[in-house]
Structures are given as C-alpha cells and as structure tokens.
Image (cartoon, rainbow, N blue to C red):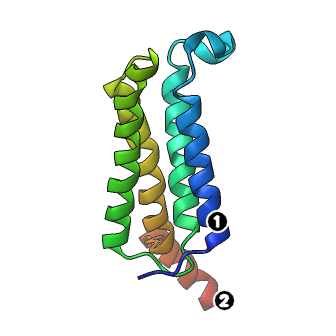
Amino acid sequence: MPVPNIKRLLIAVALTAVVLILTHLPPDVIPPVLQMKGLDKVQHTLAYAFITLLFLLSVKTAVSPAQILFLLLFVSAIGIVDEVTQPLVNRMASFGDWLADLGGTVTVLVSSVYLKNPKRKTPTNKKACQLNSDR
C-alpha cells in the first residue's frame, strides 16, 4: 500500500471540499460570467481533473493499476454524491456534469499511466538515433 504524503492528501481533501461547496451554492450567488452555457462542463472537467491529480500526487510511491482503478472509482463516487445531493439545495443534478467530472478524472489517470510508461520510440526516432550514432 502506498504511503501518502499527509500534507498533499490534506490539500486534495480540502480542494474536494471546496469544489463540493461551490457546486452546492445557489445559482443566484454565482457570478453571471461563470454561468455561460457550456462553461459548467469545462469547470467540472477541470475541477475533477485537479482533484484527481492532487490525490495522485499525495502518494509517495508508484501507483499500481489496482490503485488507479480505486482512485477512478473513488473520485467518480465523489462526483455522483456531488450530483445526487444538489437537489437538496435547489440545484439540478446533471448526468452530463457527472460525465464531465469523469472525463477530467480519466484524462489525468490515463495521462499519469502514459507518462510513467511512455512508448515514444517510433521507427522514425530509431532511424534518427542510428543516423546520429553512425557519425
């Protein structure tokens, strides 16, 4: 089991709490510039991408595929709770918002897997390396 960096973990939890508070504010409190059509999906995607990134960064060691799956399910569950509880404060739950949350989470997780295991050697790169080594 990876050992968490407590400071980073607390920051991730705090940001998650801030996002949950902001998504439960009454619509009349939110500035009109932040209520432009379609902008909410971008906001959801970025917020959940950042939450996922902070949780990933809170782990001191390499993260296994099982832990990545756990993080995907955990952050997705936070998004579901976020949407399901919004009607309690006269906001509307949205499947589209949850998909945007999921999109941000998946983007970060896939990027983290790719960055840890890049397969960047293409035939073009190998040829270039061979040409440089022949000189």
**Rendering coords of residue 88 (x, y %):** 40, 22
Give the left or right position of residue 48, taking residue 80 as reference. right
76 vs 33: above or below? below
Mark 1 or 2, which is nearer the eye? 1
Which quadrant would the C terminus be assigned to in this image?
A: bottom right
Q: Secondary structure at mark 2?
A: loop
Q: Amino acid at mark 1?
A: Arg
Residue 109: percent from left, percent from top: 43, 58
**To which quarter of the image does residue 10 belong?**
bottom right
Q: Is residue 100 left or right of residue 38?
A: left
Report crowding for label 2: few under 14, some 14 to 19, many 20 or more residues within 10 A (C-alpha).
few
Residue 8 in view, yes or no: yes
* Residue highlighted by disc 1: 8
CA separation in Å, label 1 and label 2: 48 Å
Q: How many marks?
A: 2
Residue drawn at point x = 36 percent, y = 70 percent: 67
Secondary element at image label 1: helix
Label 2 sits on residue: 135
Q: Is residue 96 left or right of residue 4?
A: left
In the rendering, at what x and y percent does residue 59 appear?
54, 73
Is residue 36 in sight in this rendering?
no
Residue located 38% across and 30% down the image: 85
Residue lying at the far front of the rendered structure: 88
- Label whose residue precedes the other's in the sequence (1 or 2): 1
Q: Nearer the viewer, residue 86 or 74?
A: 86
Quadrant of the frame with the N terminus: bottom left
Residue 74 coordinates in the image, percent (x, y): 37, 55
